[in-house]
Amino acid sequence: MLKDWNSAPYREGFNASAPSLFGMAAWGMVVGVAMIKAGLSLPQAFGMTLLVFAGSAQLAALPLIVANAPIWVIFATALIVNLRFLIMSALIAPRFAHLPWPKRVVFGFLTGDISVPLFMQRFPDMWKSAAQECEQVLYLKGLIIPNWFVWQAGSILGILAGSQVPMHWGLGFAGTLAILCILLPMMRNRPGFVGVLVASVVAVAAHAMPYKLGLLLAVLVGMAVAMWVEEHFDPVAPSGANNDVDMSSKQSSAEGRGDE
């Protein structure tokens, strides 16, 4: 851990995720308070936050736990709520397919909503060499490890504070603001802007779908539209233009040498 921290890619990943850490801590605190208010004991709440590490799934499962729903219903609900991570994992999985499976399991467990877009923004292409591969692994660690510790700190604080933290403080909104801090810079290009716009419309239109399936649908549609816009509307310089530039540069250079 200390060795990784001393590396430039790890610190770069940490710096990239730093603006979202306050909101992540606040969101973890909200989940911690919710677990205690739902009637979980301290050991149960600590176990859930350490083993589950998924705020949306935890909040979706808590009412079912209180209602004594069958265990398969609780697990199925959490699975459906977290299906978006299947899409996110597919985006970065090829970069780490060569790693031992225990390490991939740990990376998958620690990777969250904000980590994937930050990683893809920094490394849109697959690594080409061992040095690039090492850089991407360290950058991902810099994103996910501090994020996990901050989340756990906020969640444990919420568990210990329990009913002392009023819900009208609106701490959950801080988590939303943290995601917006990451999302807005990604909307500077046309595919990102259109994709987010379409996903937002779909999410609002499908908000009544059970188990938050509307969010999953919004992610799928938004990604598909963004990729389609990037393929069909993003201007790409024709190969001939590059040749013209090269020829013009060579001609200017030849004229300059002739003047000498």
Image (spheres, rainbow, N blue to C red):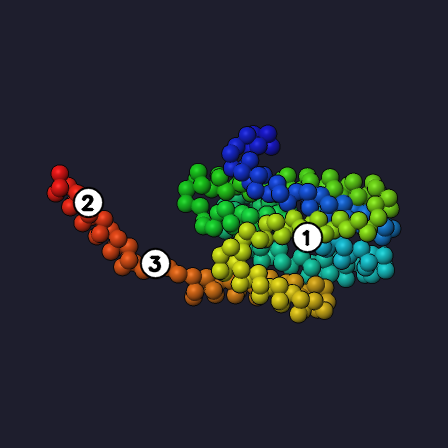
Q: Depth check: 84 or 69 in front?
A: 84
Image position of 73 with respect to 89: above or below = below
Give the left or right position of residue 88, taking residue 256 as reference.
Answer: right
SS state under label 1: helix
Lateral position of residue 42 relative to residue 99, left or right: right
Look at 60% across and 57% down and name the residue there.
86
**Between marks 1 and 2, how big is the CA–CA gap?**
55 Å
Left or right: residue 26 versus residue 144 is right
Q: Nearer the viewer, residue 33 or 71?
A: 33
Residue at 45% in and 49% down = 126
Query: Given the image, on which type of amino acid does mark 2 rest?
Result: Ser
- Mark 3 or 2: in front is 2
From the viewer's perspective, is the residue at label 1 or at label 2 nearer? 2
Q: Secondary structure at mark 3?
A: loop
Residue 237 disc label: 3
Residue at the image position 65 percent from the left and 48 percent from the top: 178
Label 3 vs 1, first from the N-terminus: 1
Residue type at mark 1? Thr
Point out the tag, 1 or 2, that comes first from the N-terminus: 1
